[in-house]
Image (cartoon, grey):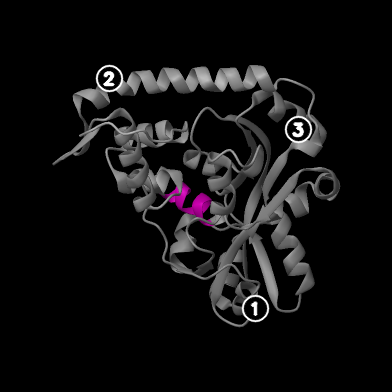
Amino acid sequence: MQKQVQSFNVELLYVFLAVADAKSVNKASQDLLQTQPSISKKVRQLERYFGTELFIRSPRGMELTPAGRRLYPAARTQLASFNKLRERISRKPVNLGELNLGAIDSIATYAYPAFFARAFSVCKSVSISNKASDLIGPFNAGKLDIVLMDSVLSKHLIGQVSQIPLFEEPYSLVYAACNQAAGEVAACGQVTATDLRRLKLLMYPEFCPIHQSIIHVFDQFGEKRPCITQTDYSESTLVTVANSNYTTILPESLARVKVSQESSSLAQVRMESRFTRRVSLFSHNPAIAAQIKDLLQ
């Protein structure tokens, strides 16, 4: 393979390490929330840059070549040095006008409304979304300096990331007031994993933070996942729940607001303690993360 002059950026090293650790382009694409073609393209770009193959396919998956094995520890060292350099250069008082912020919609709206009301007028940019991929991709690419999102999503972040826990809250099951099966569950005072497998669940797609949190609990305890019907990001989800035997899951603060608006048709009940939402602040710069945390208080 002839060496060619190619552009290079540190993301290529992140991708290389992700594929090497997962031994799979498919698994790395899931971890990084990027498409498989995108991951494969970046691996080929890195191979062209170094002028040699870094992976070979084997029955055990993507295995490192001798060149790949030499690059692996060097890539770890280089990324650590790069992150330390970035932290050292960027260590200065936070100027909100220079920051690009991102947050899950319910966090910005219900947990820190005053902060984000100000952020919209003073920050360089503010991205609010229900879709985790709208925040994770730009954050991994360095286009967002700070993201506020569910802690369970940290597995999709690449590089050296500073994570500061912000708060926890229970999840609630939301159901139609006339839903007899859900009402019987609610009469017990809380919803268990076993209950969820017996109910009809309607939720946002798998990369929704709530969806991720729920399946994480089942996987963590080695329990069979419930059957979940996925729907697109839309307010119609609660309309469907109010007029059917479907149920859905929301953070308690959001559930309380939605149910109070439709108190004649919707009801809610808290889920067992295993199903707890944990929210964190993430940044590639620990100094900025700490200062934003202070501003949120």
Q: Sequence-wise, which precedes: disc 1 or disc 3?
A: 1
- The residue depicted at 60 percent of the width and 73 percent of the height is 237
Labels 3 & 2 near each other (Cβ < 8 A) = no
Look at mark 2 in the image and give the residue it sits on: 70
How many discs appear? Answer: 3
Secondary structure mostly seen in the magenta stretch = helix
Look at mark 3 in the image and give the residue it sits on: 292
Amino acid carrying label 3: it is Ile
- Percent x, y for residue 274? 54, 46
- Percent x, y for residue 183? 60, 71
Residue bounds of the magenta highlight:
211-218
Nearest to the observer: residue 75 or residue 227: 75
Residue 274 visible to an observer of this rendering:
no
Look at mark 1 in the image and give the residue it sits on: 239
Cα distance between the residues tagged 3 and 2: 39 Å
Asked if the magenta segment contains residue 262, the reply would be: no
